[in-house]
Structures are given as structure tokens and as C-alpha cells.
Amino acid sequence: MDEPSSLMATLQGALGPAGPVLLAGFLGLVLIALALPAMLKRREDPLDKLKRETSTRARSDQSKALRTSDYSDKLQRFAQFLEPAKAEEMSAARLKMMQAGYRGRNSVRSYHAAQFVLGLSLLVIGVLWVLLTTEGEMDTQELLLKGMLPGVLGYYTPVYWVQRRVQMRREEMINGFPDSLDMMLVCVEAGQSLDQSIIRVAKEIRAGYPALGEEFEIVAQEIKAGKERAQVMRDLGERSGVPDIASFVTTMVQSATFGTSIAEALRIYASEMRDKRVMRAEEKANVLPTKLTLGTMLFTVPPLMIILIGPSIYGIVTTLGSLR
């Protein structure tokens, strides 16, 4: 018997069928316990310390009525583990969280903390469940698979949730964007400015399409704060992640740059968006017969074949049995 097989047999004989899993888990906990204090005592970067002290001082100067207690602030000391180190990765993570509707300054940190907590807790639960429900001997590979599967599911649950949120918000904005353009065109033709029409659309569209209303409200607040309109519109296109809105932003920026009529640009683009919405509906309608055909074949043809051919097959089998 080779050395690895003898070691596995020794562990299973001493600790039971789950001996290798227990040893691996114990070694992992020991490594985490040894590495975590050293990483927590790492010397803080002077620039990060200055930024933290500045932000703390600014928060302390605010009124108590404006202070909020966020549980994510408790994760400040673990920020170096829960946030990407590179600025590009951090920007991409923040953009993804904003597209999902989570705009808090600690959203990225909370997202990675949820991944860590769910993955670790479900991993422990999975290992305990395997140990308590296992009777007799079980292969080590099967034990590892059953024990680690809940941990993997827990780790990827926040990923699926955020991606699902991004997809739902995009679909909602795609469906409501033509209506918002029509409303904006009516406001502009009634004599309101583009800024006033955006504020009005943000209030009216929120009832049917909350995500789109929230985006327009952010645009209105940024314009009120004095931010350049072109940059605000570009941020809207990037933050939404919808190609139609990005094209609308480009059209509005070009209209403002070259001095063309905004009402005319809105009229043409709103007409195109209505046509595009009709084309999407027609595309879904054209796909429907194919789906119905597949469903009909799946649920109708097998029972029909059994009814038609079943008696003949039964008669053939009976005849062959009698001949034997």
C-alpha cells in the first residue's frame, strides 16, 4: 500500500470516515487563525490614514440629526480584505453595485462580506450535516463534494442576486424609456426647459418604473448641484448600462454642442424608440410559435405514439411469448 493510501486509512481509522475532511478543516482554521492577526496588524498606509481621519472629522462636524448608523461602518477595519486593491477593479465593482440599485458608499464592502459570511457559514453547516448524517464508510471525494457544495452555493448566492437585480433593472428601464421620452417631449414642447422636463419625468415615471425614475431623479439632483450637464448625461448612460439610454445621451450631448433643436431630436428619437419597442414585441411574438411547437411535440407526440403503437407492440410481444 502506498503512503497516501496508508495515511488516508490511518485518518479514517482514527477519526472515522470523515477523518480527511476534519483534518483539512482543522488545518484551514489554524492557517486562518495564524494569518488573520498578522494581516490585521499590518501598518496602515499614511494616505489612507489621512483620508480616514479627514472623513471622520467631517462626519463629527455634521449635525446629529444627519448622522446615520450603518452596519457597514463596522467593516472598516476589514476594508483591505473586502474591497479590491486596484482602482480599476474597485470602480468596476462600484458601477456594478450601482447598476443593481445599491448606491451606498459601503455597498462593495457589504457585498464581499456577504459572500464571505454566507460561504463560510454554509460550508460549516454542510460539513456538520455530512458528519451527522453519514452512516458507515463514505468515499473521501464524496464527503468533500457534499461538504463543500453548500459553501460554494453560499459564496455565489450574492453574485447571482446582484446579477439578477442588474438584469431586472435593465429590463425595467428598457420598457419604460420610450414612455419617458414621450413625456419629456411633451414637457419640452409645452415650453419647459430640458432640466425642468427631466425633473417632471422623474416624478411621473416613478410610479410605473421606479428604477428609471430614480435614475432621472439623480440626473436632476446633479444638475441642481451645478455639475456639467454633458457629464451628468454621460454618467447616466454609463450608470444605467442600457444601450438605448447611452444613444439618447449621445444625441442630447450632440444637440447641445451643435445648437440644434432639442425638441426635434427628442421627437425623432422618441419615434425610433417606439418603433424599437414594437419590433421587440414582434420578435417575441415570432418566437412564440416555435416554443409552442416544441411544447406540443414534447407533451403530445409521446402519448400519441404510446396510444397508437402500444397495442401493436403488446400484441407482438404476446405472440412471440406464445411461440416460445
Image (cartoon, rainbow, N blue to C red):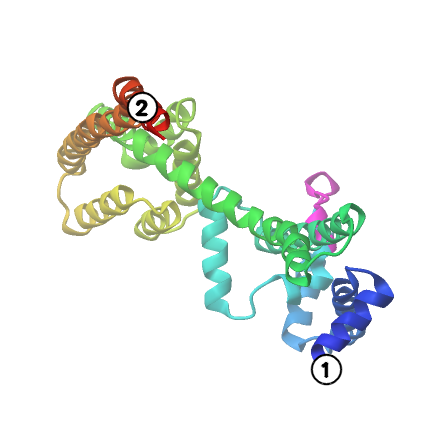
Verify whether residue 263 appears in magenta. no
Mark sitting earlier along the chain (2/1): 1
Residue that mark 2 sits on: 319
* Residues at marks 2 and 1 touching, judged by CB atoms closer than 8 Å: no
Q: Quadrant of the N terminus?
A: bottom right
Residue 15: which disc?
none
Which amino acid, by three-letter code, is at mark 2? Thr
> In the rendered view, does 157 fall on the left or right side of 124?
left
- Quarter of the image for residue 82 reads bottom right
> In the rendered view, does 14 fall on the left or right side of 156?
right
* Secondary structure beneath label 1: helix
Picture coordinates of residue 256 (x, y %)? Answer: 20, 47
Q: Badge 1, how many Cα within 10 Å: few under 14, some, many 20+?
A: few
The nearer-to-camera label among 2 and 1 is 2
**Is residue 246 positioned above or below 213 on the image?**
below
In the image, 156 versus 109, the foreground residue is 156
Confirm whether residue 113 shows in the render.
yes
Verify whether residue 66 appears in magenta. yes
Picture coordinates of residue 306 (x, y %)? Answer: 31, 22
Q: Quadrant of the C terminus?
A: top left
Residue that mark 1 sits on: 3
> In the rendered view, does 123 fall on the left or right side of 322?
right
Confirm whether residue 36 shows in the render.
no
In the image, 194 versus 219, the foreground residue is 219
Which amino acid, by three-letter code, is at mark 1? Glu
* Secondary structure beneath label 2: helix
Tell me the magenta residue range.
63-74
Picture coordinates of residue 232 (x, y %)? Answer: 36, 49
- Residue visible at 17% across and 46% down? 255
Picture coordinates of residue 70 (x, y %)? Answer: 70, 45
- Residue visible at 82% across and 60% down? 16
